[in-house]
Amino acid sequence: MPLIIWFILIYAALILAGGIVGYIKAQSKASLISGIASGVALAIAGYVARQTPAIGLPLATVLAMVLLIIFAVRFRKTGKFIPAGLMMAISLIATLVFFIGWSASG
């Protein structure tokens, strides 16, 4: 399995875990639902990228970009590096890695 697929799946797991931790620590159902939905969507993008990189890699890139924007807005609102700033940084890295993988596959 190509390395980029592993990056997508690891990012999906981080997002899913973040939603679960958000629920456990703050009883935030919104964190749980969005973490599960985003994590599953990224896992699907990873699966699709394995089968058809021309579809899965752009999908993973767009999902990471949307999460980057969401976490950036949360970081600006709260000013707290953990969790919003950390997830923003991870999402930025994921967006760049997925975009580079997408560019290289075309």
Image (spheres, rainbow, N blue to C red):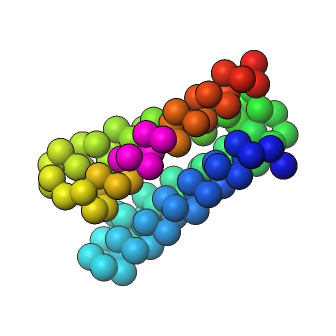
**Of the pair 71 and 94, the residue shown nearer to us:** 94
How far across and how far down the image is residue 23, in percent? 36, 75
Q: Is residue 78 left or right of residue 1?
A: left
Is 101 covered by the magenta stretch? no
Q: Could you tell me which residue is drawn at 44 percent across and 49 percent down?
A: 90
Q: Could you tell me which residue is drawn at 58 percent across and 29 percent down?
A: 99
Q: Is residue 21 left or right of residue 53?
A: left
Name which quarter of the figure residue 39 lies in: bottom right
Q: Is residue 105 left or right of residue 21?
A: right
**Of the pair 46 and 91, the residue shown nearer to us:** 91
Is 89 covered by the magenta stretch? yes
Quadrant position of the C terminus in the picture: top right
**Of the pair 57 and 3, the residue shown nearer to us:** 3
Q: Give the residues in magenta.
A: 88-93
How far across and how far down the image is residue 18, in percent? 43, 66
Q: Is residue 105 visible?
A: yes
